[in-house]
Amino acid sequence: PIEMRGLLTHEVLPRLAARAGGRVVRSRVVRTTGIPESSLADRISRIEDSLGPLSLAYLPGLEGVDLRLTAWDMDPEPADAALNSASDRLRAELGDNAYGTGEDDLARLLLDECRRRRQTIVVAESCTGGMIGERITAIPGSSDVFLGGVIAYANRLKSELGVSDRILEEHGAVSEETVRAMAHGARERLGADLAVAVSGVAGPGGWSPDKPVGTVWFGFAGQSGVEAVRYVFPGTRQEVRARASQFALFGLLRHAKSAGA
């Protein structure tokens, strides 16, 4: 591999560039999350034809759908100008669902936004089992924003966050009422500006007709109160947990941006 890299750098690539006559193939990626691929296509269908001569590819993954714009066989400056313009148009059309470009990481963007606003965050995780906290703490320097959290897997630990026996008996651990109480309790008891709570059915067991595998409830607590939202994610147990972690970070970012707005 070392010899191959040297040959590519010093022999192969210069010859290919010379044969290309200065023309390039360049790409730009717009990162999206929190929106299915079909809905994404509907949102941008009215502008997709006008993105030419660029091509547009949909690249779905666990964290969302990347949109790859590519300029083919163009001079460098026109290629960059076309990519910049098309990227800006896609992001304007998609709003908050387009959270970044290139290799942007949602956890890093969340931390940057919280630093600008001097906000702190905590997590209360059930089905994700610490995956949200892991995503955040994988970013160096996250300790100035992320205070920590609780993995409240058992109902007894959910009760420690303020989930009453009545809520658990009447609505169950996977419910709007439970995540609302978890998020509020985590924010108040751990002393943060923002909190997210997650409880769901990752599968393959534990489901019911009204709570199929993939059902996840999210609670987001901030100064203005608590918001709860339910999603049903496709995939295996690990895929459901990964998608839920991504959505939790996305929701925190949205709430961080709206705080005090």
Image (cartoon, helix red, strand yellow):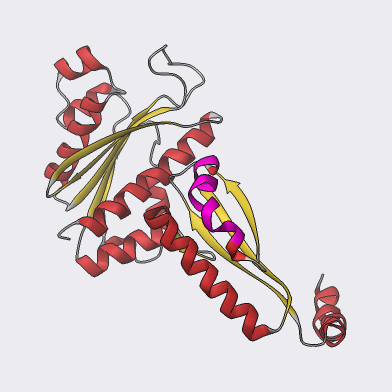
Where, by quadrant of the figure, is residue 70 drawn? bottom right
- Picture coordinates of residue 1, whole percent (x, y): 82, 69
Up the image or down, 187 lies above or below 253; here it is: above
Residue at 38% x, 57% y is 95
Nearest the eye: 197 or 228: 228
Main secondary structure found in the magenta portion: helix
Up the image or down, 207 lies above or below 1; here it is: above
* Residue 57 seen in the figure: yes
Residue at 42% x, 38% y is 244
Tell me if 50 is positioned left or right of 166 in this view. right
- Picture coordinates of residue 173, whole percent (x, y): 28, 22
Q: How many marks?
A: 0
Tell me if 44 is positioned left or right of 57 in this view. left
Nearest the eye: 130 or 88: 88
Up the image or down, 121 lies above or below 72; here it is: above
- For the record, the magenta segment spans 38-49
* Residue 131 seen in the figure: no
Up the image or down, 154 lies above or below 21; here it is: above
- Picture coordinates of residue 179, whole percent (x, y): 25, 31
Nearest the eye: 227 or 168: 227
Residue at 49% x, 33% y is 240
- Image quarter where the C terminus lies is bottom left
